[in-house]
Amino acid sequence: MEVLVHPHTGRRIAVKRGFCWTMLFFGVFVPLFRGDIKWFLITLVLSIITSGWAWLIFPFFYNHAYIEGLLDKGYRYA
């Protein structure tokens, strides 16, 4: 588990690395609940286009994409 901290606000977020089990079971709702609108839209569109098959692919890399997005927003490793 990784802990990321925003240097200005002090907000801490704990994120797991590797396979995203919640993404496997709950699909597009995981990015929505995490406030990751960009990946919510990407997973929603691709899930519609692939008739849901994208739900089997996204769990393998979503946690990494989420961490990269947080790092781009200014978060740093604690």
Image (cartoon, helix red, strand yellow):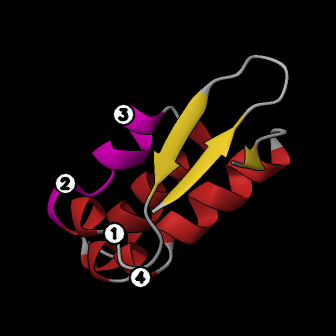
Earlier residue among tags 2 and 4:
2
Earlier residue among tags 2 and 3:
2
Amino acid type for the residue under numbered disc 1: Cys
- Helix, strand or loop at disc 1? loop
Cα–Cα gap, marks 2 and 1: 10 Å
Cα–Cα gap, marks 2 and 4: 14 Å
Q: Residue at x 29, y 62 (%)?
A: 23
- Helix, strand or loop at disc 4? helix
Residue carrying label 4: 60
Q: Disc 1 vs disc 3: Cβ atoms closer than 8 Å?
A: no
Q: Disc 2 vs disc 1: Cβ atoms closer than 8 Å?
A: no
Q: How many marks?
A: 4
Q: Residues within 10 Å of mark 2 (few under 14, many from 20)?
A: few
- Residue stretch in magenta: 25-34
Q: Residues within 10 Å of mark 1 (few under 14, many from 20)?
A: some
Amino acid type for the residue under numbered disc 2: Phe
Residue carrying label 2: 26
Secondary structure mostly seen in magenta is helix
